[in-house]
Image (cartoon, rainbow, N blue to C red):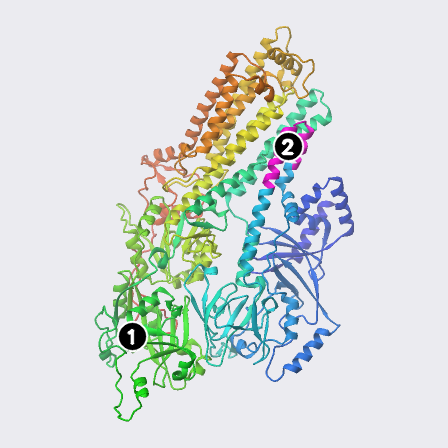
């Protein structure tokens, strides 16, 4: 009956489940439930009878609490929702459906302010707000995101604002005059206050949340159990340590909350001016802003309290908080594109998208440094998102609600702990059998059985493993690498592929002008157009006002901040080469440019213009006419997707406007008239890009008289950027940073693949690859690499997805990649089981940096939300540092885990042996072992720093790998052997010492408790006439105390290996000090007993010959443990050496493409012709593909011909690619 009911629940959930955030990263399935009274009553009774344990279980497993207390229901009737993420983690969330009483169901309804109708609309909306017949809106909130029920689609969806599905034209026609107060009040009912509210939890609340953690619940259970067993000292010590741990955790968590609160509170409450109609303004607090408000950006700038689309003026913005890029960015107003038409003839409006229009969007948390405005008009922006819906709000959410780490170590740790629980179950059964056969009381049997669980599962394991991460984070901070996601440090130890951005990462930010090559003017008028010879100087006599020079001086986004020229380094270098000056005139000087206030560029040393001579001409007019000034009236900023930018200018004294275009040569050529493009364009471009030069193409166009300044702001860039006249090429040299070549060489020696992902041209990137890596010919097979452009990558991804994994294995250069394509590349590499690192400057790489396993942003900031790691060192030398520290942290985690597991098993075996004679360890013995030995070693073995160089080997990523399991199993068997030997010898010695007693042979059955106790009393030389309640003082207990105590030290020494991932053991001074002091204490106490210590540890005085016997067992255990670990650890490398008949870490002879360099040898042949490990294919998908490609005779594909694109594009879809070749 119960099984049938469960099946009915599952079927109801499956039939009623819906999907929210479909296709997004936070995609979830949602099922509806309603509470059931009788189920709630049964659960309440169960919680009382279980002493609250059932309530804790339901708190930890929310899906059980919902299914056990509720019944399935349709979503439109449900009051409780169960959500499950569709990713690999499958996390569950339980939320309650809330009801909102509002006068309407459309969050953006009730209209906006319009000219001439404010009063009527205001009274209408006030009437709606005061209407008692309000409607109910069902919604729920999960992780600071609101989901609203839609009656039309019968589903829940994320509450959106003006950031989704709004035509660009509507920002000017519907949203440019602001909102009425009543409309703002209505929208605030849905969107709430505009505040990224990071509440700092109170200490009692944090305390309750921390104490309810399963780890601390287990600690409380253990302390209660030990107290019942009269282990008061030990229980008190563990209780004090737990309280210290709780206090430390509370302090750390609360400090993080305070830091995060302070970070976001800078813009939470500021005063801003909003429009109330076309002319009226009102000053309000930023917390009152709602989507649709029109805010005024002041002249001196402001900290943006929301995301807003710019609809008037220009802003200079510092976005370093978001991207880590310290160069200010110019934001212009939203462009109005002409109405397009779809295939069926219907009008198709371009829709606003914050990512696509990020050059026209002001993001929350960014600092507007200054504004550019036009005479009589203010800089305005329409609020599109508020609160946690903003870009900064989403980043804060990612910090508050981090995604679980998908690393094999943590999954295997849980499985290993479950295995220890199974071992504990076996020990409990053995303990119950022994105690029951000896006639122990039921309470005593229960306490001893449960004590086995507290011994087997180490309570200090989480804290010990966290210590290694904390130490690694501290060492990274000393190297200038800051981490916002500490759990990714271990993941970085498995990195086997690193993607690098080119400009600013592999090469210097600064560019040197190499030269220019103009189009020969005398050839433009002829039928054939050619380039003129290359030039080194830009401003030459006679060409001071040439279109090429004006394009260089005006086509940029530079600005002056505090009299300093700031902007993109390429723009600065290009502008400085012209010798011109940039001015941003005051309002009094705008009369020369039709009352507008543009940026003006002019020659530093102007040449007189040819003007008609007139004796009666006014001197001021003559001086004005002799000046050559170019005013920049409009700017279409650079877009990584479009790979171009343009400006519209006007020369002083002229009526016609001119447009100048700058961008990638392939893109610019496509927008130029074919007759203006030189016939040798591709050959010249090919020659420059093969030299590794960065090539920029320039073009211009004289606009028709119909284009005026007012019309420019209603014209899309597509109308301006067409029918251009090609001007020439600008070549800049982007030199490699000094650290690039040695760092790449170090990564290659470590068999870590390196991939270049850049927005630069193909041949330039290939040339830089040759310079930085150098050709690596192979004696037997060609060493080939693939290079592809972003357009090719998108086509293969969409139409040839089965071919893409094969190309990724040998892909080394990815050129002309847009930001979203970089993210897609990282995702595709992860799908073939690469551990991917991404290193970039954070400007256009944010998506890839966050998507990669390890993202490193080169920034001057201590922390950037653009990536998990931020390096203050402006070069890629941080990458090997991070990988080394990641490997060291990962190996440390394995060492600590193995040590804590062996500690539990050693103590588990010791206790089981003592249980066989109805004995146990003493209170002080437990205290000494757990505090003085285990805690000190567990927290000091993590202090070993990383090894000084990267090696081709990578540490294992799984606790369940054969070598680790064999190591743990071997040490367990060794510990069991020596403990059993010591126990049997002690038992025999005790029997021989008691000559007046007769002992049966079956001592393991537990029939010798009284005899053993008597024997130990005789050896102790005292009989106090009262039997110990735990029978602690006996020879077996004393022998196992010394043997097991030294075994803890032995496994700590054995597991704490140094090279090739960590520094040698002797460099960890604290760990060595703890080991030596513990060894000295135990051996000194064994050989030279002190009565006071004997009484404290409840030991018996044993003869000297027995002490020497125990010392021999300890030394033999130490030697055999080291020998066993060395054989197990090195057998894999020895097997490789025997199979491949080569030196250790030497690249294999079949290495002919990049993936063969990763992980050493995916397929190795011995000298006898056999293939080693052929029966077990590699686990990683890229390694299996590599083996398949080795046997594929048609791989790599060889091009049958080389085809150059035509000189002039024949269609709009032609991209103007340079000639590409497959082999490099």
- Compared with 55, 185 (above or below) is below
The verdict on residue 228 being magenta is: yes
Q: Position of residue 612 (x, y in %)?
A: 26, 90
Q: Is residue 365 visible?
A: yes
Q: Position of residue 370 (x, y in %)?
A: 45, 70
Q: Nearer the viewer, residue 1002 or 1199?
A: 1002
Mark 1 residue element: loop
Q: Which label's residue is closer to the chain start, 2 or 1?
A: 2
From the image, tell me which residue sits under label 2. Answer: 236
The verdict on residue 244 being magenta is: yes
- Compared with 796, 435 (above or below) is above
From the image, tell me which residue sits under label 1. Answer: 604
Q: Main secondary structure of the magenta part?
A: helix
Q: Position of 394 compared to 515: left or right? A: right
Q: Nearer the viewer, residue 491 or 197?
A: 197
How packed mark 2 is, by other alpha carbons closer than 10 Å (few <14, some 14-19, many 20 or more), is some
Q: Quadrant of the C terminus?
A: bottom left
Q: Which residues are magenta?
A: 220-246
Q: How many marks?
A: 2
- Compared with 241, 442 (above or below) is above
Q: Nearer the viewer, residue 1185 or 833?
A: 833
How packed mark 1 is, by other alpha carbons closer than 10 Å (few <14, some 14-19, many 20 or more), is few
Q: Position of residue 296 (x, y in %)?
A: 53, 73
Rendered residue at 46%/30% (across/down): 1073
Q: Position of residue 842 (x, y in %)?
A: 43, 58
Find residue 423 and report its image quarter. Answer: top right
Residue that protrudes farthest toward the front in the picture: 619
Q: Position of 694 compared to 1066: left or right? A: left
């Amino acid at each position: 009956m119960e099984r049938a009911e469960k099946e009915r629940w599952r079927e109801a959930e499956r039939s009623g489940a819906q999907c929210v955030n479909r296709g997004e990263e936070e995609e979830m399935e949602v099922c509806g439930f309603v509470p059931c009274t009788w189920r709630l009553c049964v659960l309440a009774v169960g919680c009382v009878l279980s002493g609250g344990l059932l309530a804790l279980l339901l708190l930890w497993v929310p899906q059980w609490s919902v299914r056990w207390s509720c019944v399935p229901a349709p979503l439109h009737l449900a009051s409780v929702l169960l959500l499950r993420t569709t990713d690999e983690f499958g996390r569950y969330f339980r939320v309650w459906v809330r009801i909102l009483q509002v006068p309407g169901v459309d969050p953006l309804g009730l209209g906006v302010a319009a000219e001439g109708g404010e009063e009527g609309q205001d009274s209408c909306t006030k009437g709606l707000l005061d209407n008692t017949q309000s409607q109910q809106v069902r919604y729920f909130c999960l992780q600071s995101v609101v989901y609203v029920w839609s009656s039309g689609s019968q589903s829940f969806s994320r509450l959106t604002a003006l950031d989704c599905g709004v035509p660009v034209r509507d920002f000017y026609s519907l949203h440019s005059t602001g909102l009425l107060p009543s409309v703002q009040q209505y929208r605030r009912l849905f969107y709430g206050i505009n505040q990224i509210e990071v509440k700092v939890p109170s200490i009692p609340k944090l305390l309750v949340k921390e104490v309810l953690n399963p780890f601390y619940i287990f600690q409380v259970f253990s302390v209660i159990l030990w107290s019942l067993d009269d282990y008061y000292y030990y229980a008190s010590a563990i209780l004090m340590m737990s309280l210290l741990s709780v206090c430390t955790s509370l302090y750390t968590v609360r400090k993080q909350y305070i830091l995060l609160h302070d970070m976001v509170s800078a813009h939470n409450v500021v005063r801003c001016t909003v429009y109330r109609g076309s002319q009226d303004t009102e000053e309000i607090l930023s917390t009152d802003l709602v989507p649709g408000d029109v805010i005024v950006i002041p002249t001196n700038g402001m900290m943006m309290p929301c995301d807003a689309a710019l609809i008037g003026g220009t802003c200079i913005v510092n976005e370093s908080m978001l991207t880590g890029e310290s160069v200010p960015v110019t934001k212009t107003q939203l462009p109005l594109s002409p109405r397009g038409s779809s295939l069926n003839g219907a009008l198709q409006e371009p829709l606003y998208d914050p990512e696509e229009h990020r050059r026209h969007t002001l993001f929350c948390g960014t600092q507007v440094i200054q504004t550019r405005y036009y005479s009589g008009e203010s800089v305005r922006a329409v609020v599109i998102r508020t609160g946690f819906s903003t870009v900064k709000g989403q980043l804060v959410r990612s910090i508050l609600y981090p995604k679980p780490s998908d690393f094999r170590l943590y999954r295997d740790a849980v499985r290993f702990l479950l295995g220890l629980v199974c071992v504990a179950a076996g020990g409990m059964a053995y303990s119950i059998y022994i105690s029951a056969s000896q006639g122990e009381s039921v309470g005593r049997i229960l306490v001893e059985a449960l004590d086995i669980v507290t011994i087997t599962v180490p309570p200090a394991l989480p804290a010990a493993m966290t210590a290694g991460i904390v130490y690694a984070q501290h060492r990274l901070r000393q190297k200038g690498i800051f981490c916002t996601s500490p759990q990714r440090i271990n993941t970085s130890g498995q990195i086997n592929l690193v993607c690098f951005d080119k400009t600013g990462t592999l090469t210097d930010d600064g560019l040197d002008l190499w030269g220019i090559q103009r189009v020969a003017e005398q050839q433009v008028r002829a039928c054939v157009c050619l380039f003129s010879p290359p030039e080194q100087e830009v401003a030459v006599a006679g060409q001071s006002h040439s279109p090429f020079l004006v394009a260089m001086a005006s086509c940029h986004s530079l600005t002056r901040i505090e009299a300093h020229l700031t902007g993109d380094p390429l723009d600065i270098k290009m502008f400085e080469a012209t010798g011109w000056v940039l001015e941003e005139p005051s309002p009094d000087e705008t009369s020369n440019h039709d009352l507008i206030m543009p940026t003006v560029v002019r020659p530093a040393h102007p040449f007189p213009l040819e003007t008609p001579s007139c004796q009666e001409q006014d001197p001021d007019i003559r001086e004005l006419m002799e000046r050559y000034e170019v005013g920049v009236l409009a700017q279409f900023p650079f877009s990584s997707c479009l790979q171009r930018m343009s400006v519209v200018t006007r020369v002083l004294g002229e009526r016609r406007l001119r447009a100048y275009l700058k961008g990638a040569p392939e893109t610019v050529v496509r927008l130029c008239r074919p007759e203006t493009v030189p016939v040798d364009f591709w050959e010249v471009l090919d020659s420059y890009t093969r030299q590794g030069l960065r090539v920029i193409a320039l073009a211009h166009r004289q606009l028709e008289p119909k284009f005026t300044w007012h019309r420019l702001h209603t014209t899309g860039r597509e109308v301006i950027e067409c029918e251009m006249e090609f001007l020439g090429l600008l070549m800049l040299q982007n030199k490699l940073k000094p650290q690039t070549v040695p760092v790449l060489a170090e990564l290659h020696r470590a068999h870590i693949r390196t991939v270049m992902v850049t927005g630069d041209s193909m041949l330039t990137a290939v040339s830089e690859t040759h310079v930085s890596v150098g050709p690596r010919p192979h004696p037997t097979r060609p060493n080939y690499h693939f290079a592809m452009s972003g357009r090719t990558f998108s086509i293969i991804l969409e139409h040839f997805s089965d071919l893409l994994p094969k190309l990724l294995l040998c892909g080394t250069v990815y050129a002309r990649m847009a930001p979203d394509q970089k993210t897609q590349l990282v995702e595709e590499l992860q799908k073939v089981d690469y551990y991917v690192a991404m290193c970039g400057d954070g400007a256009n790489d944010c998506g890839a940096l966050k998507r990669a396993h390890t993202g490193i942003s080169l920034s001057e900031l201590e922390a950037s939300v653009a990536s998990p790691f931020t390096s203050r060192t402006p070069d890629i030398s941080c990458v090997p540092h991070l990988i080394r520290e990641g490997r060291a942290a990962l190996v440390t985690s394995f060492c600590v885990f193995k040590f804590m597991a062996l500690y539990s098993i050693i103590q588990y075996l010791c206790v089981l042996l003592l249980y066989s004679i109805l004995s146990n360890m003493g209170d002080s013995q437990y205290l000494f072992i757990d505090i003085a030995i285990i805690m000190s070693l567990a927290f000091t073995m993590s202090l070993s720093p990383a090894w000084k160089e990267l090696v081709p080997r990578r540490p294992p990523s799984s606790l369940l790998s054969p070598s680790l399991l064999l190591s743990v199993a071997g040490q367990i068997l060794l510990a069991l052997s020596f403990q059993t030997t010591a126990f049997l010898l002690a038992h025999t010695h005790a029997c021989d010492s008691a000559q007046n007693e007769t002992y049966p042979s079956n001592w393991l059955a537990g029939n010798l408790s009284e005899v053993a106790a008597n024997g130990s009393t005789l050896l102790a030389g005292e009989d106090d006439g009262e039997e110990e309640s735990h029978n602690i003082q006996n020879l077996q207990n004393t022998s196992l105390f010394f043997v097991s105590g030294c075994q803890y030290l032995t496994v700590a020494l054995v597991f704490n290996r140094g090279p090739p991932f960590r520094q040698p053991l002797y460099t960890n001074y604290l760990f060595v000090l703890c080991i030596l002091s513990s060894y000295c204490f135990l051996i000194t106490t064994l050989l030279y007993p002190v009565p006071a210590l004997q009484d404290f540890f409840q030991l018996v005085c044993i003869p000297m010959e027995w002490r020497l016997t125990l010392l021999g067992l300890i030394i033999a255990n130490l030697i055999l443990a080291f020998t066993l670990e060395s054989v197990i650890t090195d057998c894999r490398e020895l097997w490789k050496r025997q199979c491949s008949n080569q030196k250790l870490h030497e690249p294999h002879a079949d290495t002919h493409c990049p993936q063969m360099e990763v992980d050493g040898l995916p397929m190795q042949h011995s000298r006898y012709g056999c293939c080693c490990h052929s029966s077990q294919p590699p686990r990683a998908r890229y390694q299996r593909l590599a083996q398949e490609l080795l046997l594929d005779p048609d791989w790599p594909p060889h091009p049958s011909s080389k085809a150059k694109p035509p000189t002039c594009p024949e269609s709009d879809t032609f991209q103007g690619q340079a000639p590409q070749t497959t082999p490099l």
